[in-house]
Structure formats: C-alpha cells, structure tokens
Image: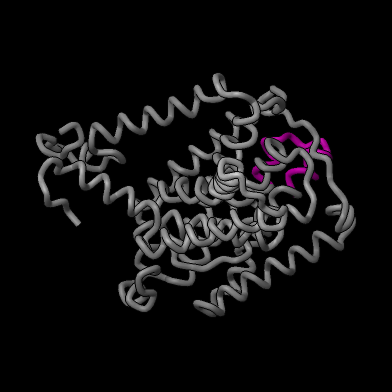
Amino acid sequence: MFYRRAGIRHTSYRSERRLWRLPFDRGLVALVGALLVIAPLVVDRLYLVGYLMPWVIWSTAALGLNFLMGGAGQVHLGYGAIIAIGAYTSTHLVRAHAPFEIAILAGGLASAMIGSAFGAAALRVKGLYLAMATLAMQSIVDFIITHVGWISGGGQATLTVPTARLLGFELSGDLRCYYFALFVCLMVALFMLNVGRSSFGRALAAVREKDYAAAVIGVDSFRFKLLAFWVSSFIGGLVGAVLAFCFYHAISPDQFHLDLSIQLVAMVIVGGLGSVLGSFFGAALILFAPILLNQAVGALATGLGVSISADLRAHLPLMLYGGMIMGFLLIEPLGLVKIYDNIRNYFMVWPFRHAPR
C-alpha cells in the first residue's frame, strides 16, 4: 500500500498543480536525482564515459526531438543536422576565443534559426511530405559541412575541440563534463515538464490533435508549429555543443549523418511520443540494448561451446535488437513509458484487481 492516491487530498491549486503529486513519485524523483549525482563518484571511469554520460546527453537530444514530434506532432528526420550546426558553431566560436557561455548559446541560436528557416518551408506540407522535407535538410547540411573547408576542414577531416572555460573554470575532466551535461539535461527536462501546463503547451497540443480545429478556436497553427521547430532546434544546438565539448572532444562530419537522426527518432518512438520519461527510456534502450545483446550472444556461444563466425557475431545482435524493438511496439504501441504507466497503475490499487486504464 506504499504507492497510493488514497488519503491524499489537495486543498489548494498549488498542491494540485505539482509536477509530482504523489509522495512516492516525489521520493522516486529525489532518489534518481541523488543517484545521478553520486554515481560518477563511485562507478569506474569506463562506465561513466561509456554508459552514463552518453545516456544523459542523448536523452537530452531525445527530449528536444520529442518536443517537436510528441508535443507538436511534426515529423523530423534531420535532427542530426541540427545537432551538427550547434556543435560546429560553438566549436568555431571558442576557437576564436569567444566565451563558452556565449558560444553554447550561439550554437543553440544558429541551430534554431536554420532549423526554423527549413521548418517554415517544410510546414507547407504534412506527413510523409514533411518527413521528406526534413530529410532533404539533413542531406543539404551534410553536404555543406562536408564540402565547405572552413567549417569542417573536409569530409575526412577532424576538428579538434579546444578546452572551454565555464564561469572561470576549465570544462575538462570527466566529472566536470558529466555534471555540466547533467545540468543541461535537467534544465531541458524541467522545461518540458512545465511547458505542457502553459498556454504555449496547450496550443501545441491543440495543433497536434487537429490543426483545423485549433484554427477554429483561434490558434495560429503555422505560428505555433514554427515556434516548436525553433525551440526543438535550439535544444538540439545546445546538445551539439555539449557533445563537442564534453563527450567527443573532436568532431567530424560522419558523426552527424542520417543514421544519427534515425536513431533519435527511434528513441522518441520506442520511449513514447510526448513523454519526458519516455525519452530517457528510449535513449537507454537504443544505446544499451545492442551492447547487452552482443555480450549475451558471446556468453551464450561460449557456454554452449558453439563457434560463431565473426560476420554472424556482428549481425546477430542487431537482428535481435530490431526484433526486440518490433516486439515492444507490438505489445505496447505507445512505447516503454506506457508499460511503465501500466505497472504504476497496477500498484496504485494493489492488492485489488481493477486498475484504472
């Protein structure tokens, strides 16, 4: 009976409008936050750099894309290009001795302006046509970054990212980089949680559900869709700067190709459209499932004494990974966050049988 609504009464609008109205939810959020803060101090550097930091950064990217796809209902297959714009803009500004605080904001603004410019043209179409328009944006940005020498140095070149200074401190070392990435992630998550309760979020929800009906009640659907592109692209630019300075430390065009955009879309869909928590679930599954499946296949083959060719060893985990994603979506099309909600609703009425749907 530890996870119940029974006995919890709201006597003011303030308590009713809390982000987490159940004491258990507030405790769980506090526990997860404490673990994220303490984890780098106790885990090995391999796990920090190889697992925890990528999960935090790509969860932030999934949040930015989910704002557009889940919040406004607009498909985007060029988010990798948005991240690339932020990464290259911030890197070049810091190399030109600009303060990092200005560089990261400029990276976000550059991504927002270019992303919304493409969005203004793309929003004249819908559905698959919009997806193809954003895919064209990915191709155009890829081509420009690869072939304009002063941006990237060429298709095969790697641009070294200098060490930045944040508020007078060097942004160097795994701990500082992780905590900065975690700070950005938490700020984006808090923004996503609160925007749904604002007039802007309600207008986006109306546009997502039926833009013609939203226009009838006075919501300018084109304006709010364009704002959604702007905000989503700004978050993508921030993620690009964090990736460049905290994780990659050297950037090249092949880090931001179409496959990155497809992976981000998969994170959003598998996690759950329009869900903040789903973005974290989706990022974890897409990042870690191939690694765990690869280790499981190797351990199983060793335990059974079966010899597996290198080619099959490389492709079998990917086949299982694709099948697992299809299975998740067949079982629950609304994503992993819906499975979590079902478990949560079950424990709300446990040990009784009937859970709310």
On the rendered structure, is 19 left or right of 32?
A: left
Residue 141 spot, x, y in % from top left: 74, 64
Front residue of 48/302: it is: 302
Could you tell me residue 295's position as x and y percent? 59, 43
Asked if the stretch drawn in magenta spans residue 138, the answer is: no
From the viewer's perspective, is residue 189 above or below residue 121? above
Question: Residue at 72% of width from left, 42% of height from top?
Answer: 244
Name the image colouring: one colour
Residue 112 seen by the camera: yes
Q: Dividing the image into 4 quarters, which one contains the N terminus?
A: top left
Q: Which residues are magenta?
A: 89-106
Q: Position of residue 254 (x, y in %)?
A: 77, 56
Residue at image location 31% in from the left, 41% down from the top: 19
Picture coordinates of residue 186, whole percent (x, y): 48, 37
Q: Quadrant of residue 165?
A: top right
Q: Is residue 305 left or right of residue 227?
A: right
